[in-house]
Amino acid sequence: MRLVPQGWIKAAELTSAVGAAVLGAGAALLLPIEWRAHAPVLLLAGAAVHGAGMTLKYCLEARSGAPAWWAQGLFVLCWAGLALLASRLWIAAAAGR
């Protein structure tokens, strides 16, 4: 029986932590009026990425062998979504919104 490589479990933990950080940023942004419009997107993205990371971590720890194709795809989607969110916020900040 093969175990899941530790790198995948660490990647799932990192994904979960980043999701929790984005969720926290969204919660913190509920207060400043000029950033309030971005808070719902940050809260949803943070909750989704954190939940996906935690789910994948537990799935990987319970499974033997390499991660499934959908798990690898979910990692890519989470990080791509965070990159798009960061781009959106950067553009909004540059435009003064």
Image (cartoon, rainbow, N blue to C red):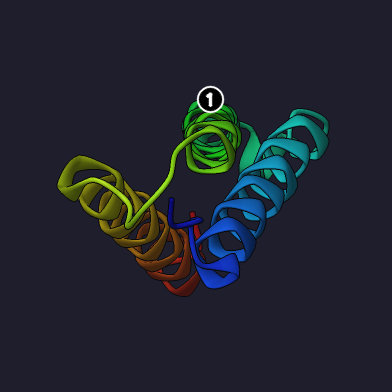
Residue 49 in the image, given as x and y percentages of width and height: 50, 39
Tell whether 78 sits left or right of 21: left
Tell whether 91 sits left or right of 30: left
| Rendered residue at 27%/55% (across/down) | 72
Helix or strand or loop: what does disc 1 sit on? helix
Q: How many marks?
A: 1
Residue sitting at the far left? 69
Does 12 sit above or below residue 47? below
| Rendered residue at 24%/45% (across/down) | 68
Does 92 sit above or below residue 44? below
Name the residue type under label 1: Pro
Residue bearing mark 1? 40
Classify mark 1: residues with Cα within 10 Å, few (<14), some (14-19) or many (20+): some
Task: In this rendered view, identify the residue nearer to me: 11 or 78.
Answer: 11
Residue 43 in the image, given as x and y percentages of width and height: 59, 29
Tell whether 44 sits left or right of 81: right
